[in-house]
Structures are given as C-alpha cells and as structure tokens.
Amino acid sequence: MAFTQEKKRQLFLQKQKEKRSETFDEKRDLSELFAGDSTEPMECESLSRKKHFKKCPFGYKLMGSEWCTEVPDDLPDNWLIKLCPEGIRYLVVANKAITTCYYRNGRPSFTFKSKLPGGNPDCGHKFTVLDCIYNKDVNTLFIYDVLAWNSMSLINAEVQMRFFWLKSKFDELPELSSINERKNFRFMLVDFFLAEVALLQDHLFTPFVANGVELSLDGVLFYHKEGHYVFGDSPLVWWLRTFMLPELLNIDVPPLHLRNKPDDYESIQQYSSKKKKKSKKESSDSMEMEQLENECENVDLE
C-alpha cells in the first residue's frame, strides 16, 4: 500500500512521539561516539602497509530529505524554510581541540582549529556537531542544523528549539563569522523563516550574499517544526531545487537561481525518479566497497 506524503509525515510524527517513552535513547548513542578514541584522526581513504583499516564513526549521521511532490495543507503554519547555496554537504565535528569536516559517508575531508566548543585547546574536552554546506567560492561553511553543542545533544529536540538554540549560541561567538587565519574561511549561520509562499518569493529576490559575493541558490529546505534530527531520510524535511519552485508553488524565481536547471528537465516526478535510481546504484556500489573493506580489516598487508 502506497502512502501519500502527508500520511507518511503523520505516521513519522506519531512514531517520534512514541519513541520518547522508549528506553533506547539516541542522545546516549551520539555521546558514545566521543567516549573513546574513535574520533582520533583516521586514514580512511586507503589501506596502507602494516595498518588496519579503521571505520569512520561519523558515517551516515546526516539527516536526509525527501522530494516534495505535494504541498502540505499546513505549510504556512508548521513549516520553516532555509535557502541553500551550491556547495558540499559536511558533518562538522569539533572535538579534542580540532574541527573536522566529514563527507556524508564519514570520510574526513579536512581539519582545522575553530572557536566551536571542542574545536580548540581552550575547550578540547567538549564536542559540537553541526550540519553544514561548504561553498569554496566564498570559503564559507554555512550552518544549517545542530546535532550537539558544547557536549549537549540536541537530536531529540524539535526543529524550532534547535534553530533558536543555534542562533543564540552563534550570536554568543561572533568570532565564528571571522576569517580563520589558517584556512581562510568562516562560518555563517543560515537564517530560517516561516514557510509562507509570499515570504519565500521575497527572499528569493533578495541577494544571498556571503563574504561580499552574491551566490546562486541550489535549492530550498523545508523543515517541519516538530521534527527531530534523525540519521537518514526524514519525511519531516523536504527539498526542492530552485527550478522546481514555479512548478509546485507557482512563484517566480530569479534567473541567477535557475542556471542549474537541466536541459532535459520535465517535472519533479521525472527528476526525482531519475535521482532515486542513481542513488540506489551508488548505495549498492558503496555497500560492495564496505564489504570489501570489512574483509580487509584484519589482513596484515605484507
């Protein structure tokens, strides 16, 4: 039986409420990632002689979204919006006096010292975990969500609480917006606003500027106010590329934000179906690689 997107959201919200009374607590699971030595710098990209392969503990901890094919009836009342520039999605982890950017699969991309709690020697015993997009053109890490701040887990907090918490903490550390001397980039917190169509229209025609440069938007994220942060796809978060907005919401989009529209684009359904097929293939390839890595884990490479 196929569920509508609205039915899926209702069921997901119900399970989320029921989960609060269960003994298993995801907060504890997140904290356990920092309990031992699993967050030490790892050579995850390749196997080397006399060295066992180490699994990356932060793999697949980013929350995924779903394509939206039907507009929720409660859109202006229960949803929030964040605009997304083009860039690379990272899980940013500050712990043991270093800050590391991880790809979705848990592979480390680069490390640096930051003013985040846990990201420098002054508070290295703490940990902070953020959901970010990195745009190399402006050397900026755009902050979208928070999983933990100053060793306090927030994945079981609702979106509204996480966003307000993140803003208050970010405002307390203005140095995060300053250019990092060593890596020459900065953090920028992306504002959220109510999911009102007219308001979205206004924001689309307001320049999205970072480091003095106007950026092209890649898409729009919609968050249900009551959603928790989950590891994997959530029906309480949905995503539209900017060129899909006229089709679903009947609004205008500036030409700057339409330049990523494929020449063969037909509809959201057609585009999302093509992406799902590609994602399944990549997932299958990834599983095969992981199986190979597991087989090699205890091999002494002479």
Image (cartoon, grey):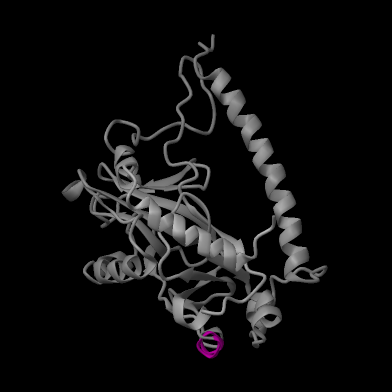
Which image quadrant for residue 166?
bottom left
Viewer can see residue 131: yes
Residue at position x 63%, y 37% in the image: 286
Q: What's the magenta bit mostly, secondary-structure-wise? A: helix
Q: In the depicted view, which residue is nearer to us: 204 or 284? A: 284
Q: In this picture, which residue range is highlighted in magenta?
A: 197-202
Position of residue 156 in the picture relative to residue 74 (left or right): left
Residue 6 on image: x %, y %: 58, 68
Which image quadrant: the N terminus?
bottom right
Q: Is residue 201 magenta?
A: yes
Position of residue 32 in the picture relative to residue 55 (left or right): left
Residue at position x 49%, y 83% in the image: 76
Which image quadrant: the C terminus?
top right
The residue most toward the top is 302
Whether residue 66 is situated above or below residue 164 in the rendered picture: above
Viewer can see residue 133: no
Residue 130 on image: x %, y %: 38, 56
Residue at position x 76%, y 68% in the image: 262
Whether residue 37 is situated above or below residue 26 in the rendered picture: above
Residue 112 on image: x %, y %: 35, 49
Position of residue 225 in the picture relative to residue 251 (left or right): left
Task: Tell me how many marks there are.
Answer: 0
Position of residue 280 in the picture relative to residue 90 (left or right): right
Residue 290 on image: x %, y %: 58, 30
Which image quadrant for residue 187?
bottom left
